Image: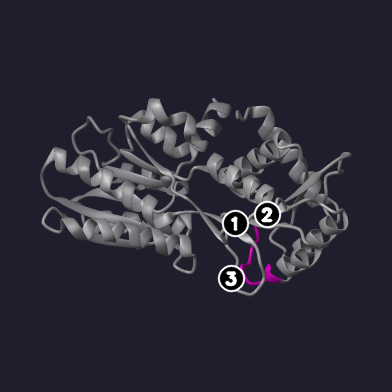
Amino acid sequence: MKITRRNFTVAMLAACAASAALPGFVKAQDGKAIAILFDSLQSPFWVTSFAVLKEKAAAAGWTPLEAISNLDDSKQFEQVQSMLQRQVDGIIIVQTDSNAVIPAIREANKAGVPMVHFNRPPAKSDAKSVAIQADNKEIMKSTVQALVDIAKAKGGKYQAAILIGDLGDQNAVQRRDGFFEVVEQYKDMIEVVARISTEWNADKAFADLTNALQANPGINFLVTSSDFLIPQIRQALTVAGKWKKSNEEGHVLFAGFDGDEGQYQALSEGYMDVGGVQDLFFEADLAINAIKKIRAGEQVDALLLDPGFVLTQATLEADRDRSWGYTVWKAQN
């Protein structure tokens, strides 16, 4: 499966058309159809997910029907109802609110149409659906352990900082917990001197990391809970004179999480040491296959986890084709 620059252009044009019209649908073709309903395309991860899901749906013999709700729960509920009226074979959905989506799940249940949540599980209820999610804690544990292994090989003591996401987001909580579960095993080597709460805000991340570097100039071990903060991390480390490649004196051991194109570029250029990657292509397969299995009468677990994988400078060339961020980077370069 290969995404090209053209795929991204088509995805964005379709999304714009979908969000400009009510109820926001791309016209269906004849034959079987599957609904792909996103709340937005606000990041490369969601743009890539949208394109990959459409291609995999088409490869499975379905016409993908697209809709973007623009973060409007009521609009998305209407889109679900309209898709059910079109008698789609299944719905893959990215909702904004985990509770607000429950009435939509119940509508799908009444119609006997499988619903799969992509990367955002719904709140607990008696409504039946399937959720696909990255195993955030385990991916972060593997990522941090790989960074610790590099630190052990280099020797010495380390002052660590972690950029934590919005703790109202379970993904952020799980990533934070994965970090601490590993570093607490190495207290003789690693001291966590800065816990930076970013609230998923880039400006806050830059300001608070800058302050942390000023207060703790010995920071030499850094982990971010999301790769979208890499530009701010680069800026803060540059100001502190610490944005160095791994083979340069003063390099800060650096790990990221998500697997976007910024992660791939930072790894390939030698500024980042380790990257935890959500296996988007695997997650898309899980979503498509869940609908197939439910329609065939098979039992499917309510939560299907993506174990992800870890990239390092040493494994980058061999494993980069598995990385969705490399796919984005390649399309842009």
Quadrant that contains the C terminus: top right
Residue that mark 3 sits on: 123
The reply to whether callout 1 and callout 3 are in contact (CB within 8 Å) is no
Among the two numbered marks 1 and 3 on one chain, the one whose residue lies closer to the N terminus: 3
Q: Is residue 100 magenta?
A: yes
Mark 1 neighbour density, 10 Å: few (under 14) some (14–19) many (20 or more)? some
Q: How is the rendered protein coloured?
A: one colour
Mark 2 neighbour density, 10 Å: few (under 14) some (14–19) many (20 or more)? some
Point out the frontmost of discs 2 and 3: 2
The reply to whether callout 1 and callout 2 are in contact (CB within 8 Å) is yes
Residue 132 sits in quarter? bottom right
**Which disc number belongs to residue 300?**
1
Q: Is residue 153 magenta?
A: no
- Left or right of residue 271, residue 107 in this image: right
Q: Position of residue 300 (x, y in %)?
A: 60, 56
Magenta region, main secondary structure: loop
Quadrant that contains the N terminus: top right
Among the two numbered marks 1 and 2 on one chain, the one whose residue lies closer to the N terminus: 2
Residue 195 sits in quarter? bottom left
- Left or right of residue 135, residue 13 in this image: right
Amino acid type shown at disc 1 = Val
Residue that mark 2 sits on: 294
Label 3 sits on a secondary structure element that is loop
CA distance for labels 2 and 3: 21 Å
Residue 181 sits in quarter? bottom left
